[in-house]
Image (cartoon, rainbow, N blue to C red):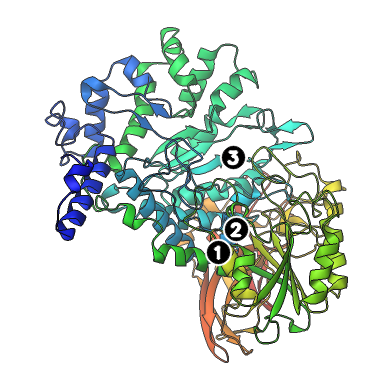
Amino acid sequence: MSCNKKSLLFGNKVVVILVFLLCLVHSSESLRPLFACNPANGLTRTLRFCRVNVPIHVRVQDLIGRLTLQEKIRLLVNNAAAVPRLGIGGYEWWSEALHGVSDVGPGAKFGGAFPGATSFPQVITTAASFNQSLWEEIGRVVSDEARAMYNGGVAGLTYWSPNVNILRDPRWGRGQETPGEDPVVAGKYAASYVRGLQGNGAGNRLKVAACCKHYTAYDLDNWNGVDRFHFNAKVSKQDLEDTYNVPFKSCVYEGKVASVMCSYNQVNGKPTCADENLLKNTIRGQWRLNGYIVSDCDSVDVFFNQQHYTTTPEEAAAASIKAGLDLDCGPFLAIFTEGAVKKGLLTEYDVNLALANTITVQMRLGMFDGNLGPYANLGPRDVCTLAHRHLALEAAHQGIVLLKNSGRSLPLSPRRHRTVAVIGPNSDVTETMIGNYAGKACTYTTPLQGISRYARTLHQAGCAGVACRGNQGFGAAEAAAREAEATVLVMGLDQSIEAETRDRTGLLLPGYQQELVTRVAQASKGPVILVLMGGGPIDVSFAKNNPRVAAIIWAGYPGQAGGAAIANIIFGAVNPGGKLPMTWYPQDYVAKVPMTIMAMRAYGNYPGRTYRFYKGPVVFPFGFGLSYTTFTHSLAQNPLAQLSVSSYKLNSAIFNSSSNSIKVSHANCGTFPKVPLHVEVSNTGEFDGTHTVFVFVEPPKNGIKGLGVNKQLIAFEKVHVTAGAKRTVQVDVDACKHLGVVDEYGRRRIPMGEHKLHIGDLKHTILVQPQF
């Protein structure tokens, strides 16, 4: 079919439109990569690996058996080479979808029929919603758009997202990509987002293939002369088991993720991508990964050329594949694997095992089935839809956190506050709102544009960028604040301050931002609202303690609709319900804590990390967030106060007086009764609102060495309650799942004694005792 201009020269307008639409469809189909087994491919459609009714594992082995060693090796890298004699086209494995389809990796490209994709809030902001159904729905929308772009020939189906590392240190430049500091939250986020991306798993099929990264103990990029390529993370068995590995285990166990990415750093002297215990034994052995393991880009090259872990490149190739690596992001394995086989460091069977894992994922995606399946009709009309844009706005609404609201200064009234000064380096930004690993947004609404929908605005940037190296614009900003009936300062960070390869040195606002806020607050004749953009915590104690600053809002990086969401909250169209997914520390905290110390627990002068182990002063605590209404909790029923637990094999290794605990691995978990908590949430204010019910447990202080836990989040539920109404939330406490702790050897145990549950201001104690 020809789609030149002449083919559109018909008198009937309807015919013109129909022919034009057919041309678009034809153009989209022509861009699709032609994989083996396409009905139009006469080379291979009769071969066994092309038969859809044959089990996938049989098809995979049939295909591998037809490949030469050289062909196999060229499939071990992200830009997998074509195998023309089998009709197999080349494939780019590397695509990103952290919070929307991204063009950071080479696998996805924008332009033509796909100028952009829906850009949701950065993960740290979405995590602040504590809404698991929202996380999954975002994943579903992102995968719709990814499939549509794949059908259009401009994207792949393998997405190396999400990032589920723990936000251990507030200075980490990539903390913005993560769900925060709590391993349970990170795990729930991982499982929810992955389920959204990959689909319901029916028939062992995948909508797209997600990837949880960066495994493991990866949370330093470039700090004080130490970079991620040379960093050896010294991690205790205890911290590895109860912090760093928790989200990855949840991602594999609960999310059924199709891939895990190993990281650049070493863990206890061994590169993660060459660690058989971490990869083959743990991810694939203990957790039963149904998928492939991929390196972070050039990780194998890094551990050979920069960490000097092996003597020869062939040894590096062999070490990674034998450890369980299936795919190399980078050319290293394509160059050196054949030499490793020839030198006897590796066998062709080892290569086959790696290929089986990657090709199985491709077949689960339907990439060898031609243009079939439930997603074949997705196209440009399914990207940046009105519903998707609305979800991006709703995600920003739910993730924004109100940190201060003196005298109920917010919400502003469009009737009383008709003129608003909008000031600050982030007051009229676009790309800043979508953070890193983002694509091309469908559209943007800046804070200035959002506020302009409610009031006349007086705009002054105040600073030339967030670095704010001078105060030349302060006078004009003060003048605007004197004239306006309210002032909104939009300050904070951007990717020039925190990003991949860029960790912060401190927690204060950059440059002269603090002075700008203070001077404008002093000059303003109306209420002053400080809005902060940024992924990592910021020490704004000066504003928290300044009575001239009436309100503080943390917006994180709120996505393409961030400006509209900020304005809707400021003017009361939306009641904020977000909660901080990380602790906000004071500046002097980082002076005591080198980023290179991986220990979570406090010892000596070392204060520990995160709300679980740190007991010092904070600017704002984990889980903090205000509302325009008020909520109270009560227990609707009296829960169990005593629980007896047993083990199928009681002996000194499992239960003894010194540890006063039972190993979870030896406990009769299936026989323990769950403790149902019926938490009644009452909205006692004037606004409808959403509230997050947090359930923390404080374990007994018994004989388990090095426990050091203040409290641990075990469950959270988001609930919407109208003004004056009540809602009941049920949380079932499971002794093995929720009351276990990790000892110094990395073993989970259930300590005997009083476990104190904290639900807001409520406390409930469960006495756990052994049953002989």
* Residue pictured at 85% horizontal, 74% vertical: 548
Determine crowd level at label 1: few under 14, some 14-19, many 20+ residues with C-alpha closer than 10 A.
many
Determine crowd level at label 2: few under 14, some 14-19, many 20+ residues with C-alpha closer than 10 A.
many
Rendered location of residue 207, percent (x, y): 33, 49
Left or right: 59, with 396 as reference point: left
Q: Nearer the viewer, mark 3 or mark 1?
A: 3
Q: In the image as oriented, which residue stretches furthest toward the top?
A: 343
- Residue 735's label in the rendered image is 1
Along the viewing direction, whichever of 612 and 445 lies nearer the viewer: 445
Q: Amino acid at mark 3?
A: Thr
Q: Is residue 309 above or below residue 281?
A: above
Tell me the residue that label 3 is attached to. 216
Along the viewing direction, whichever of 254 and 179 lies nearer the viewer: 179
* Residue pictured at 63% horizontal, 45% vertical: 746
The picture quadrant where one finds residue 475 is bottom right
Q: Amino acid at mark 2?
A: Gly
Gap between marks 1 and 2 measured at Cα: 7 Å
- Residue 740's label in the rendered image is 2
